[in-house]
Image (spheres, rainbow, N blue to C red):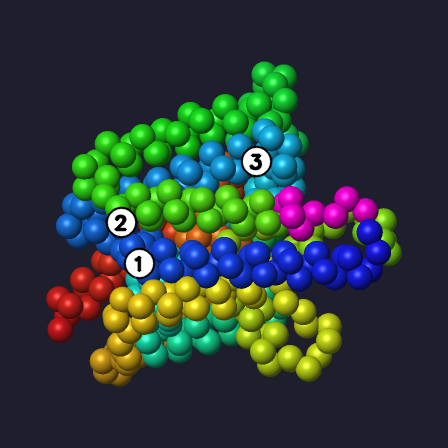
């Protein structure tokens, strides 16, 4: 493969990722898929319908990820979630911050992008503030604090950071067999649990669960198979084209928001190139916009008052800092990360749920105070 072929393939990867993210945005808006909303429904109303949507999406993504691995289409050990270093304190602190922030900001990173497509000016402000905070935590002053504090507290697992790797070491099974076995049990279990509810077995529920889980799988295929080059013509190294981490990636939105702002600000700088994350951010907004316009649900929305503005600003800051610290958001760790059965992702998601609960308690305190 020469340089021209490599560039052409990179463009194909970016267009494919863009198309998949447009589909994600369309489905998320069409079905009102929202992790924060799912947690809120359980805590405040005792309704598990949207949580079952989320569970089904994760289950389908697990089956898809390890199904691709068993077919030899991707290397399941080459994701950003399966490294052997378990940064449990970063995942815990970051997850708590992110969960708390998404309640104050009326939704997580993906929901912010979806609501931008429906005309929410509040979400546009959240996007800019969250992206700024994320970049400061990735490369700025907060990055120095993060690297020298919570990131220092971790432990190493020789077998790797994903649960199937442990099973493979304990049983002697191949990595693909262990992954598929655990995906069938855990991912299949989530799908069955979701389908046990009659309220979930609707066109909307099935579209959210199967649709978004399939989009996550599609992104793994785009990044890990379509965009994989075994031997770069210049470096002779194996590369995953158009990724920021240099590894296989799927949907995630906190760090990509930062990189999107960086790309827009430094557009004339030829070193700033489009990545899967950047095109995914744009794609989700566009997909949501198409659905909102098509269904005539597009509405301009602004802040109610000063307190509403302040809460959204604080929430956006918490999500930007927390999402980077935890290495992902409710989609990055909650859908993509959990699909790999990563221990760090499990810790981060548990912390996000706990942070959201604290956020709901804080909102109740504000109401009682008023």
Q: Which residue is drawn at 85% across and 49% down?
A: 236
Residue 241 position by quadrant: bottom right
3 or 1: tag closer to the N-terminus: 1
Write down the residue under mark 2. 204
Write down the residue under mark 1. 30
Q: Which residue is drawn at 54% across and 33% down?
A: 66
Q: Position of residue 201 (x, y in %)?
A: 23, 39
**Tag 2 and tag 1, C-beta contact below 8 Å:** yes
Q: Distance between the residues labelled 3 and 1?
A: 27 Å
**Callout 1: few (<14), some (14-19), or many (20+) C-alpha neighbours within 10 Å?**
some
The answer to whether residue 106 is magenta is no
Q: Where is residue 127 in the image (x, y as percent from the top left)?
A: 43, 72
Q: In this view, does 140 lie above or below 178?
A: below
Write down the residue under mark 3. 68
Residue 119: numbered disc: none
Q: Which residue is drawn at 40% across and 60% down?
A: 25
Q: Is residue 24 above or below residue 282?
A: above
Q: How far apart are marks 2 and 3 (CA)?
A: 26 Å
């Amino acid at each position: 493969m020469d340089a021209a072929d490599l560039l052409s393939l990179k463009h194909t990867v970016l267009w494919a990722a863009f198309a998949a993210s447009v589909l994600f945005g369309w489905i998320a808006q069409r079905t009102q898929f929202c992790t924060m909303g799912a947690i809120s429904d359980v805590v405040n109303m005792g309704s598990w319908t949207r949580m079952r949507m989320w569970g089904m999406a994760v289950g389908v993504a697990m089956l898809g990820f390890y199904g691709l691995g068993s077919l030899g289409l991707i290397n399941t050990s080459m994701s950003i979630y399966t490294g052997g270093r378990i940064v449990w304190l970063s995942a815990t602190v970051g997850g708590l911050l992110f969960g708390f922030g998404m309640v104050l900001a009326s939704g997580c990173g993906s929901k912010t992008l979806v609501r931008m497509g429906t005309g929410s000016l509040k979400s546009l402000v959240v996007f800019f503030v969250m992206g700024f905070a994320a970049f400061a935590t990735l490369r700025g002053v907060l990055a120095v604090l993060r690297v020298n504090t919570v990131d220092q507290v971790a432990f190493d697992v020789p077998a790797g950071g994903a649960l199937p790797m442990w099973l493979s070491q304990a049983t002697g099974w191949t990595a693909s067999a262990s992954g598929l076995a655990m995906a069938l049990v855990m991912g299949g279990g989530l799908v069955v649990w979701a389908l046990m509810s009659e309220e979930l077995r609707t066109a909307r529920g099935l579209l959210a669960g199967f649709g978004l889980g399939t989009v996550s799988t599609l992104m793994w295929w785009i990044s890990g198979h379509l965009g994989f080059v075994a031997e770069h013509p210049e470096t002779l190294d194996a590369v995953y084209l158009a990724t920021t981490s240099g590894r296989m990636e799927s949907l995630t939105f906190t760090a990509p928001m930062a990189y999107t702002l960086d790309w827009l600000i430094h557009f004339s700088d030829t070193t700033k190139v489009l990545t899967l994350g950047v095109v995914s951010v744009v794609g989700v907004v566009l997909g949501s916009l198409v659905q909102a316009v098509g269904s005539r649900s597009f509405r301009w929305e602004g802040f109610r008052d000063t307190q509403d503005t302040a809460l959204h600003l604080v929430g956006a800051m918490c999500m930007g800092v927390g999402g980077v610290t935890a290495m992902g958001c409710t989609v990055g760790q909650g859908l993509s990360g959990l699909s790999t059965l990563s221990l760090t992702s499990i810790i981060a998601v548990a912390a996000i749920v706990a942070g959201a609960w604290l956020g709901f308690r804080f909102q109740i305190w504000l109401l009682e105070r008023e």
